[in-house]
Amino acid sequence: MKQQHVFITRRIPDVATPILRAAGATFTVGQSDEEKGLTTHEILDGVKSADVVLSLLTEPITRDVLAANPRLLGIANYAVGFNNVDTAAATELGIPVSNTPGILTDTTADLSWALILGAARRIVEAHEYMVAGRYKLWGPNLFLGGDVSPGGNGKRKVLGIVGYGRIGAAVARRAMGFDMDVLAYDPHNPDAIARDAADPAMHVRAAGLDELLRESDFVSLHPLLTAETRHMIGDRELNLMKRTAYLINVSRGPVVDEAALVRALNANVIAGAALDVFENEPLMVPGLAECHNAILVPHIASGSQDTRDRMATMAAENAVAHLKGTRAPNVVNPEVYDTAAYAARRSAASA
């Protein structure tokens, strides 16, 4: 039997490679330049010689890619999301697809709070002012921002959380350290909201989206990207928010209509925004980069060393399961294992 091979689309943390080697597999990396993606041609070339593909969200694993190799045994996606993989086509072709869930909850919640605090206290603006040598004399009007805690007026602030899954709930837990009240909106996850609302220490209650937008001092977005949530925050929703409120998005870029957000920021409809994700990443809509009241970071919500290492380990373990023909620990299309297409693919691979 030939030695099995894993095609890793782009460089990931090195902790993955000993796991692949221990399984007797070889591997290649499509390209290691952190600032360049793969072309479709490069992806297809890599897939054709691979038993398993370990992909990133930046690579579209389309039907054509999946069909390019009849001996392909699985896709191990290095991400919680798997929108980049045509899972319906994979299932039809008998190819298991896996992801790396449940790892980045705390890390992402931490970044949400870094953005909340950074936006409210104008940290980026103040840093740029300082390093530009413009700080000459302290004054009482220098970079006035907003309180997150009750602060100077002693009034509890309201954090609105849209999408109350694992990450949204983790953001809410952190709000308790700032003596905040939390409004939660998630029509698909009412039990999680009810659970935390029943805990008097959490200060959480359910709210409709419009109510949440009107009453919140900070709105933190954590929904899944669906047809329903695409552009769920646009002109109308932004105009419902307080002029002193801040919008935070670490979920998916298309949840926010970026052009509408630029209009709102320029007109001071809201006080500010902080974004980790963008509609057409890595591009931004015209004018967003020039908004002085926006913090913009390059999709780093899961960007701690420990979290990225754990994601790499999990992706490699999923890849090994695909190679061996065992159920992957984090398969997203488990029904594939009962299909004739999967059986045929395993048979062809062992021939």
Image: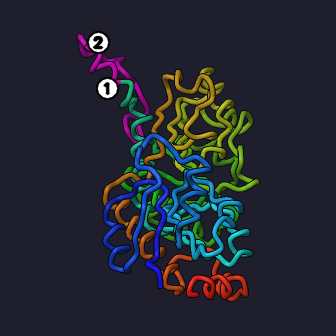
Residue with the mark numbered 1: 127
Camera-nearest residue between 295 and 243: 295
* Main secondary structure along the magenta-highlighted residues: loop
Left or right placement of residue 298 versus residue 341 in this view = left
The residue carrying pointer 2 sits among few (fewer than 14), some (14 to 19) or many (20 or more) residues within 10 Å by Cα, namely: few
Against 78, is 253 above or below?
above
Q: Is disc 2 placed on a helix, strand or loop?
A: loop
User: Quick check: can you spot residue 71?
Assistant: yes
Q: Which mark is residue 25?
A: none
Residue 110 forms part of the magenta stretch: no
> Picture quarter containing residue 143?
top left
Residue for point 51% across, 61% down: 79
Against 44, is 240 above or below?
above
Lower sequence index among marks 2 and 1: 1
Which residues are drawn in magenta?
126-152
Residue for point 59% across, 70% down: 194
Left or right placement of residue 175 versus residue 206 in this view = left
Against 124, is 194 above or below?
below
Residue 138 location (% of width, % of height):
25, 16
Q: Is disc 1 placed on a helix, strand or loop?
A: helix
Residue 173 location (% of width, % of height):
43, 60
Left or right placement of residue 221 versus residue 68 in this view = left
Residue with the mark numbered 2: 134
